[in-house]
Amino acid sequence: MTAGDVLVYFDPSPDGPASFQRGVATGPEIIDPRTGDWWAPVLRPDRTVDLLPGALVVGVGTADGTLH
């Protein structure tokens, strides 16, 4: 994953607009050296920046729609 990639992720919040959202990666994934879990820095549709747990990410692609 690199900055600019499009992420599709599960949004578990009950008041969210949809169960699945798209966001834009703001950088490479961050890996926790202790657990091996990875986190995705993402610009969400509401323009907020967040770190998403890798378990919520269901797809990664480029801006033109090509999946990794």
Image (spheres, rainbow, N blue to C red):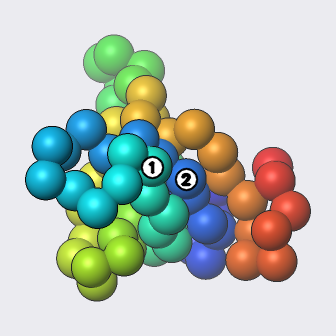
Q: In 3D space, how far apart are the residues under numbered discs 2 and 1 (Cα atoms)?
A: 7 Å
Q: Is residue 12 left or right of residue 35?
A: left
Residue 64 location (% of width, % of height): 82, 77
Q: Residue furthest top?
A: 35
Q: For mark 2, what is the residue?
A: 8
- The answer to whether residue 43 is above or below residue 33 is below
Query: Of residues 41 and 33, which is closer to you in this image?
Result: 41
Q: Nearer the viewer, mark 2 or mark 1?
A: 1
Residue found 33% across the figure and 16% down from its top? 35
Disc 1 marks which residue? 20
Q: Is residue 28 found left or right of 20 in the rendered image?
A: right
Q: Residues within 10 Å of mark 2 (few under 14, many from 20)?
A: some
Count of labels shown? 2
Amino acid on which disc 2 is placed: Val
Vertical side of 36 occupied by 59: above or below: below
Give how far across and how far down residue 63 sits, in percent.
73, 77
Residue 60: tell me if it is visible: yes
Q: Which mark is residue 6?
A: none
Q: In which quadrant of the rendered view does residue 32 lie?
A: top left
Amino acid bearing label 1: Phe
Answer whether labels 2 and 1 touch (C-beta < 8 Å): yes
User: Looking at this view, is 50 or 35 the one in front?
Assistant: 50
Disc on the earlier residue, 2 or 1: 2
Quarter of the picture containing the N terminus is bottom right
Residue 66: image x %, image y %? 86, 62
In the displayed orientation, state which residue is furthest to the bottom. Answer: 47
Residue closest to the far right: 66
Dot 2 lies on which element? strand
Which of 21/3 is in front? 21
Left or right of residue 18, residue 6 in this image: right
